[in-house]
Amino acid sequence: MLGAQDGAYPWEIAELAEAETRRQATPGQREVVRAPPLRLTELCFSELRAERMSPLLALGLLVAGLCPTVHCLPGDMPDSGNVAQEDQPNRTSVDNLRLTTSNTDFAFHLYKLLAAQTPNENVIFSPLSISIALAFLSLGARNTTLTEILEGLKFNLTETPETEIHQGFQHLLHTLSQPNPQQQLSVGNAMFLKEELELLDKFREDAKALYASEAFPTDFKDPAAAEKLINDYVEKKTEGKIVHLVGGLCKNTMMVLVNYILLKAKWKTPFDPGDTYESAFHVSRSRSVQVPKMSFEERMVPFFRDEELACTVVELQYISDDSALFILPDEGQLGAVEAALLPETLRRWRASLRMRWIDELYLPKFSISSNYELETILTQLGIEKVFTTKADLSGVTGTPNLYVTQVVHSTVLDVAEEGTEAAAATGINIAFSSGVMNPLIVDFNRPFLLFIISKDTQSILFGGKVVDPSQAPH
C-alpha cells in the first residue's frame, strides 16, 4: 500500500513547490466558476463479474476501474526531447481545427444524450475531460475496441491517424497547463494501480509523455485503506469540493484512474452584489421558483440575436479572456435549439457576436452539480466492446483479459457575482424608468444553455443546461 511518508502522501512531496508557487501567484483570488469533474472506471479481469455499487454511493462517483482520464499539470509535461513531441512545433492550424471540431461534435452529441436522459433536470458536464479520458484509454486499446473509442469521439480515422489524435491532445493539454496569473485552471490525473499489476513499458511511457499521467501502487486487498488514499488525493486536488468519491472498492480491483478539472476565474466585469435580488425563474409554463438573480445595466456586451433558431446569445468574458456563452431560447424553442447544436452552430454564434449596448441583463446566481454513469450513453455513441468481456485492452498489460465496468462523471459549477459565496449579497432591487426608447433587456428567467470556452484552445471546458437554478447540488 502506498501511504503517507513523514505525514505527507507521495504526490504531496512532488507537488509541494508547485503548490506554493501557485498560492503565491494568486493570493486571495476569488472564484466565479468552480467545476471539478472527476471520473473513474474499474478494470477487472474479464472473468470476474462486476459488482454493483450501493445506491448510496451514486452521489459522488461510483467506483470502477480504468478509463484513464488525464490532463497536464504545470511542470508535468515531458521534456522536448521526447519522441512523442517531435512533431509538436509542426502542428498546423488545420490540425488544431480538426481536433476542436471533433471535440465539439462529441460534446454536442453527448449533451443531447444527457439531456434526453433527464429532460427536466439541469445538465452540467465537462466534455473535454471525458474526451481526454477516452483518448487516454485508447492508448491501451487494440483492434475493434480502439476503432470504436476513437470513432465514438467523432474522429475520422481516414483523415486523422491515431498518432495525430494523441499528439493533438498532448498539444491541447500543454496549452491548458500554461501558468496564467489571471485564473486557476488545474487539470490532472492519477492512476492507482494494484501493486502486482505490471504495465507494458510502452503504455506507461505513452501515458506519461502524451497525457502526463502519474501512477501510484495501491494495495486493493485492503479496500478501506485504498479508498482513503484515493479520496484524500481527490479532496486535495479539488480543494475540498469532492470529499468522498470512492467507496465500496472490491479486492479484485486492478486499477482506478482519477481525473479532475478545477477552474477558478473572475469575470472581466463583475456583477455588483448589491444589485442581486430575488426574482422568478420559470422552470416550465406551470411552475416558477424564486432565485437570486444578478444584474447589470447599461453595458457593452458581445451579443447576437439568432432569428433562425429563435434564441439570444450573450457572451460574458473572464479576465483571462476565456468566456461563458449563454444561450436563451425563446419560449417553447428550447428543444429546437438543442437539436441544432452542431460545431458549425457554435462557430456561427461566435462569429456573429457583436458588441451591443445592453440596457439591462439578468442572470440567475446558481450552483449546480451532476453525477452520470456513462456506459449506456457511450454505447449509444458506438463505444461498446470496451464494456464487455470481448474488450481488447491488451495494450495495457499485454493480455486481453481486462475490460471497463463503469465510467462515471461528476461536475460542480458555481456562477456568482465574483465567485465568492460569502460575498454574495441579496438585496431588494428597485427598478426605475430610464426613459430609453425600446431598451434592450435580456432576462435569463427560463431554461437556458451555457458553454464555457477556452480562448487558447477553442475547447468547450464545461457545458450544460440550467432548467432549475434553485436545485441544490447533489
Image (tube, rainbow, N blue to C red):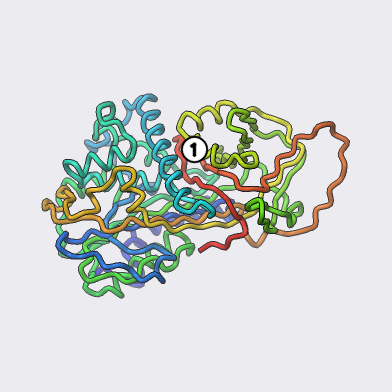
How many neighbours does mark 1 have within 10 angstroms: few (below 14), some (14-19), or many (20 or more)? few
Q: Is residue 208 left or right of residue 198?
A: right
User: Considering only vertical position in the picture, is 375 above or below 438?
Assistant: below
- Residue 145: x, y in percent? 21, 44
Give the total number of marks visible in the rendering. 1
Q: Position of residue 99 (x, y in %)?
A: 36, 33
Of 341 and 273, which appears nearest the observer? 341
Q: Residue at x 38, y 30 (%)?
A: 96
The location of residue 36, given as percent across then percent down, is 46, 55
Q: Quadrant of residue 167?
A: top left
Image quadrant occupied by the N terminus: bottom left
Apparent side of residue 228 relative to residue 104 in the rendered image (left or right):
left
Q: Say what amino acid the circle numbered 1 marks.
A: Ala
Element under disc 1: helix
Residue drawn at the location 21% of the way across and 62% of the way down: 254
Q: Can see residue 148?
A: yes
Whether 424 is drawn above or below 207: the answer is below
